[in-house]
Amino acid sequence: MIGKIFILTELNPILKRTIVAIPFVAMVIDISSWYITTIIPWFAYVVVTAGGLLGLSLATQILVSLYQMWFYPFHPSLEMSQEAQNRVEACQEILEGFGYDMMPENKGWLIRESLRTWHFLTDVEELEDYTRQVKERHQGD
Protein backbone atom coordinates (compact mmCIF):
# COMPACT_ATOMS: atom_id res chain seq x y z
CA MET A 1 0.00 0.00 0.00
CA ILE A 2 2.85 2.39 0.78
CA GLY A 3 4.40 1.78 -2.64
CA LYS A 4 1.06 2.33 -4.35
CA ILE A 5 0.69 5.74 -2.71
CA PHE A 6 4.35 6.62 -3.35
CA ILE A 7 4.02 5.89 -7.09
CA LEU A 8 1.52 8.79 -7.29
CA THR A 9 4.09 11.35 -6.12
CA GLU A 10 5.64 13.86 -8.47
CA LEU A 11 9.17 12.48 -8.74
CA ASN A 12 11.23 11.16 -11.60
CA PRO A 13 9.59 7.82 -12.63
CA ILE A 14 12.91 5.95 -12.64
CA LEU A 15 13.70 7.18 -9.13
CA LYS A 16 10.21 6.21 -7.93
CA ARG A 17 10.47 2.71 -9.37
CA THR A 18 13.90 2.25 -7.83
CA ILE A 19 12.75 3.36 -4.39
CA VAL A 20 9.70 1.06 -4.59
CA ALA A 21 11.84 -1.93 -5.67
CA ILE A 22 14.48 -1.51 -2.94
CA PRO A 23 12.37 -2.95 -0.07
CA PHE A 24 11.67 -6.12 -2.05
CA VAL A 25 15.32 -6.60 -2.93
CA ALA A 26 16.32 -5.86 0.67
CA MET A 27 13.83 -8.45 1.98
CA VAL A 28 15.23 -11.15 -0.32
CA ILE A 29 18.81 -10.30 0.68
CA ASP A 30 17.85 -10.11 4.36
CA ILE A 31 16.08 -13.48 4.46
CA SER A 32 18.70 -15.29 2.38
CA SER A 33 21.41 -13.79 4.62
CA TRP A 34 19.87 -15.52 7.65
CA TYR A 35 20.68 -18.87 6.13
CA ILE A 36 24.08 -17.86 4.78
CA THR A 37 25.02 -16.53 8.24
CA THR A 38 24.87 -20.10 9.58
CA ILE A 39 27.69 -20.96 7.16
CA ILE A 40 29.60 -17.66 7.00
CA PRO A 41 29.23 -15.74 10.30
CA TRP A 42 30.22 -12.31 8.94
CA PHE A 43 27.03 -12.35 6.84
CA ALA A 44 25.33 -11.07 10.00
CA TYR A 45 26.45 -7.60 8.85
CA VAL A 46 24.53 -8.12 5.61
CA VAL A 47 21.40 -8.93 7.64
CA VAL A 48 21.73 -5.64 9.52
CA THR A 49 22.54 -3.66 6.38
CA ALA A 50 19.62 -5.13 4.41
CA GLY A 51 17.24 -4.41 7.31
CA GLY A 52 18.50 -0.83 7.48
CA LEU A 53 18.07 -0.41 3.74
CA LEU A 54 14.52 -1.74 3.97
CA GLY A 55 13.68 0.67 6.78
CA LEU A 56 15.31 3.61 5.03
CA SER A 57 13.49 3.04 1.75
CA LEU A 58 10.11 2.61 3.49
CA ALA A 59 10.74 5.75 5.55
CA THR A 60 11.58 7.64 2.34
CA GLN A 61 8.36 6.45 0.70
CA ILE A 62 6.25 7.43 3.70
CA LEU A 63 7.87 10.84 4.28
CA VAL A 64 7.83 11.90 0.61
CA SER A 65 4.20 10.80 0.25
CA LEU A 66 3.13 12.67 3.39
CA TYR A 67 5.04 15.77 2.33
CA GLN A 68 3.42 15.85 -1.08
CA MET A 69 -0.04 15.15 0.34
CA TRP A 70 0.04 17.81 3.04
CA PHE A 71 2.67 20.47 2.26
CA TYR A 72 3.40 20.36 -1.49
CA PRO A 73 1.98 23.47 -3.21
CA PHE A 74 -0.60 23.01 -5.93
CA HIS A 75 0.30 24.08 -9.43
CA PRO A 76 -1.65 27.28 -10.27
CA SER A 77 -3.14 25.69 -13.39
CA LEU A 78 -4.82 23.04 -11.21
CA GLU A 79 -6.98 25.57 -9.46
CA MET A 80 -10.42 25.45 -11.04
CA SER A 81 -13.52 27.44 -10.31
CA GLN A 82 -16.42 25.71 -8.57
CA GLU A 83 -18.38 25.86 -11.82
CA ALA A 84 -15.60 24.05 -13.72
CA GLN A 85 -15.35 21.43 -10.95
CA ASN A 86 -19.10 20.82 -11.22
CA ARG A 87 -18.80 20.39 -15.00
CA VAL A 88 -15.96 17.86 -14.52
CA GLU A 89 -17.99 15.91 -11.94
CA ALA A 90 -20.97 15.80 -14.30
CA CYS A 91 -18.76 14.45 -17.10
CA GLN A 92 -17.26 11.88 -14.75
CA GLU A 93 -20.70 10.61 -13.72
CA ILE A 94 -21.76 10.25 -17.35
CA LEU A 95 -18.56 8.45 -18.35
CA GLU A 96 -18.74 6.11 -15.37
CA GLY A 97 -22.34 5.34 -16.34
CA PHE A 98 -21.03 4.04 -19.66
CA GLY A 99 -18.29 2.00 -17.94
CA TYR A 100 -15.37 4.36 -18.52
CA ASP A 101 -12.80 5.08 -15.81
CA MET A 102 -11.68 8.69 -15.33
CA MET A 103 -8.85 9.78 -13.06
CA PRO A 104 -6.94 13.03 -12.58
CA GLU A 105 -3.41 12.83 -13.95
CA ASN A 106 -0.82 15.64 -14.02
CA LYS A 107 -2.62 18.61 -15.55
CA GLY A 108 -5.65 16.82 -16.95
CA TRP A 109 -7.68 13.62 -16.85
CA LEU A 110 -6.85 10.12 -17.98
CA ILE A 111 -9.84 8.22 -19.33
CA ARG A 112 -9.82 4.48 -19.86
CA GLU A 113 -12.21 3.28 -22.52
CA SER A 114 -10.97 -0.29 -22.57
CA LEU A 115 -7.95 -2.27 -21.53
CA ARG A 116 -5.90 -0.90 -24.45
CA THR A 117 -7.60 2.43 -25.15
CA TRP A 118 -6.75 5.45 -23.01
CA HIS A 119 -7.31 9.17 -23.62
CA PHE A 120 -5.60 12.12 -21.95
CA LEU A 121 -7.65 15.32 -21.87
CA THR A 122 -6.23 18.61 -20.66
CA ASP A 123 -9.13 21.04 -20.24
CA VAL A 124 -12.80 21.03 -19.29
CA GLU A 125 -14.08 21.88 -22.78
CA GLU A 126 -12.14 18.97 -24.27
CA LEU A 127 -13.58 16.69 -21.58
CA GLU A 128 -17.12 17.86 -22.32
CA ASP A 129 -16.62 17.31 -26.07
CA TYR A 130 -15.33 13.80 -25.39
CA THR A 131 -18.31 13.10 -23.12
CA ARG A 132 -20.69 14.23 -25.88
CA GLN A 133 -18.96 11.89 -28.35
CA VAL A 134 -19.30 8.99 -25.90
CA LYS A 135 -23.02 9.75 -25.42
CA GLU A 136 -23.52 9.78 -29.19
CA ARG A 137 -21.59 6.52 -29.59
CA HIS A 138 -23.72 4.79 -26.96
CA GLN A 139 -27.05 6.34 -28.07
CA GLY A 140 -28.46 3.01 -29.29
CA ASP A 141 -27.27 0.95 -26.31
Image (spheres, helix red, strand yellow):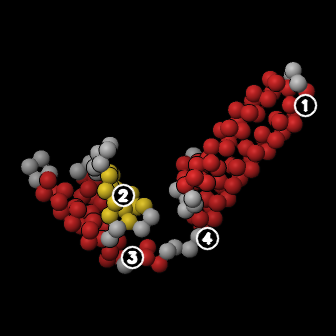
What label does residue 80 carry, if any? 3
Q: Earlier in the sequence, mark 3 or mark 4?
A: 4
Between 19 and 109, the one nearer to me in the picture: 19
> Looking at the image, which residue sits at the far left?
140
- Locate residue 52: give its quadrant: top right
Q: Is residue 71 left or right of residue 137?
A: right
Q: Earlier in the sequence, mark 1 or mark 3?
A: 1
Q: Residue at x 70, y 49 (%)?
A: 57
Quick check: marks 2 and 4 in contact, CB under 8 Å? no
Residue that carries the numbered disc 2 in the rendered image: 110
Residue 87 appears in the figure: no
Rendering quarter of residue 107: bottom left
Residue 42 tag number = 1
The spot of residue 6 in percent (x, y) is: 58, 54
- Image quarter for residue 127? bottom left
Secondary structure type for disc 2: strand
The reply to whether dot 2 and dot 3 touch (C-beta < 8 Å) is no
Which of the marked residues, 2 or 4, is nearer the chain's N terminus? 4
Q: CA distance from mark 2 to mark 3?
A: 17 Å
